[in-house]
Amino acid sequence: MSDTLISASNLQKRFGDFEAVAGIDFEVRQGESFGFLGPNGAGKTSTMRMIGAVSPRSGGDLSVLGLDPGESGAELRARIGVVPQRDNLDDELTVSENLYVYGRYFDLKRPTIEARTKELLEFAQLSDRADAQVETLSGGMKRRLTIARALINEPEMLLLDEPTTGLDPQARHVLWDRLYRLKQRGVTLILTTHYMDEAEQLCDRLVVMDKGVIAAEGAPHQLIAKYASREVVELRFPVGVEADLSAEFGHMAERVEALPDRILLYTDDTDRSISMVEDHHLEPETMLVRRSSLEDVFLRLTGRSLID
Amino acid sequence: MATPLTLRIVEYRARYFRRTWRGTVVSSFINPLLYLLSLGIGLGKLVDANLPGGVDGITFVAFVASGLLAAATMQSGAGEGMYPVLVPFKWSFTYEGQLATPLSIASIVNGHFIWIAVRLTMVAAAFTIVSVILGALPADTAWLGIFPAVLSGVAFSTVITAAVVKAFVPQALAGIQRFVVIPMFLFSGAFFPVDQLPGWVQPVTRVIPMWHGVELSRWLILGLEPGVAPWVSFAYLTAVLIAGWGATMYLYRWRLWQ
């Protein structure tokens, strides 16, 4: 038995004339957490829906848990868990009823569901809200309940589509902590995100997607090492000034990116770059040095920011 | 059709109903009751006074109650094909949640209609019991009207469900209610014999599924000769049910399998 859970080759998805996924290749292995990083409209959700056997592929090959999602949809869905981009809980039902109803969809017996509910609510830190109507929960709680619900069938892998979009920072950290625990238990996580910090926190390996194709693949630190310098100097100038200045930076760093609101200097010697900026009396409003991130990788690969 | 997973949908709908039934009492129970009291008993006094011995020996209140049983059940059936269909598509996204499990689109559609049959049986039974208590219907035959009422209600709900999934905007619901459901309700023959209408309108009433439901329950409860042979009405309602169910299945696949 191979440890490859998903393998896709030349996978495509078209909606009429629109090519959402334009032929991608990737593999996901047992126990790893794998991410699709890209902006909205990159084809991440379409890919996830094909993996989850809720959307037919338009071309190419796809195998998930050794099954063809196009042919063995129900059998496949019985073995995976899905956390969708938008919550689809039953607001009028209680927290535990939501788990019960969902467990029944997997044809689980009542005692099994009840035992797992207790465990899952503990995991999702919702034990004290078991009998609360879902409508009364906060956004973060609903998200955690959705994750708990996706685990009711003890899935072999968990698909998470934008798991923390729309949550406040504290709720995001709680959620990351829960996902990290799952990962440590050996659950294979597959997630999409347009947050680079989320990708860095959770993904062992990821693909950068843009406009339906994969632009790069690797571990976060590998991608950063390959496509960006170790550190970045970020300069912010008063509105309208930077465009005139951008030509002056060429020699101050290995690579320069001029964004609408900032100039980024990619360099392995930030002290040297900073002193050169100072020597030229460029006087930015703010200047900061930070480590390179996946955001910089994305910028390098596509010329655009992750979040427009 | 009734695979275990289809029944999981019915089970879910029943559980959901247990939380939300209060909101349905007015439209599916109180309103028909008010029609029965105002038209059947109130107006009935006036009608019976002018028709000693009633129509074919049937009092007006019995005439109305037997027809209203089917008409009111059908109105509830139409309601079950409106918001309960549009909400999971557009606002709660619960269909997406269900489809991420082993459930299929077919099990969602079949479960929806089986649940409507269960729900309309409750509506028709409640109306029947109250009608018998009020003395509007004969206790020994009143229950016979439940089957045609539920059959015509489910048949009509398949048509409404398909129309709602096709139209897909909430504004369509008000339009369907005002221009389809209410006119049908008024001209289905529940409140007066449709042969009172001008000759050219009468063939139109034969197309209305609700009219067939009304005629069948009146025939079974009161023994009143129906406008067409009962088997024609049963066949027609069954045909509407199959066509509406097929259209619904097609449209759900069209919306959800993309």
Image (spheres, coloured by chain):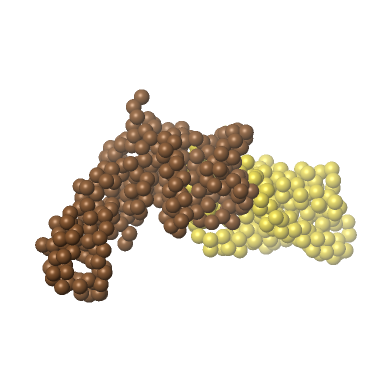
Chain colours: A brown, B yellow
**Front in this rendered view, residue B19 or B224:** B19
In this image, B95 relative to A190: left or right?
A: right
Quadrant including the N terminus of chain B: top right
Residue B236 vertical placement versus B79 (above, below): above
Where is residue A95 shown, x and y percent of the image? 59, 48
Residue B241 vertical placement versus A293 (above, below): above
Residue at image position (44%, 47%) is A177
* Image-quadrant location for residue B110: top right
**Front in this rendered view, residue A276 or A196:** A276
Where is residue A73 shown, x and y percent of the image? 44, 36
Residue at image position (82%, 57%) is B61
Where is residue B196 shown, x and y percent of the image? 72, 61
Q: Is residue B230 visible?
A: yes
Where is residue A284 shown, x and y percent of the image? 22, 71
In this image, B139 relative to B2: left or right?
A: right
Q: How many marks?
A: 0
> Seen from this angle, which residue lies furthest top?
A1
Q: Is residue B114 visible?
A: no
Residue at image position (28%, 53%) is A293
Residue B241 vertical placement versus B92 (above, below): above
**Front in this rendered view, residue B169 or A74:** A74
Residue at image position (28%, 37%) is A9
**Front in this rendered view, residue A54 or B157:** A54
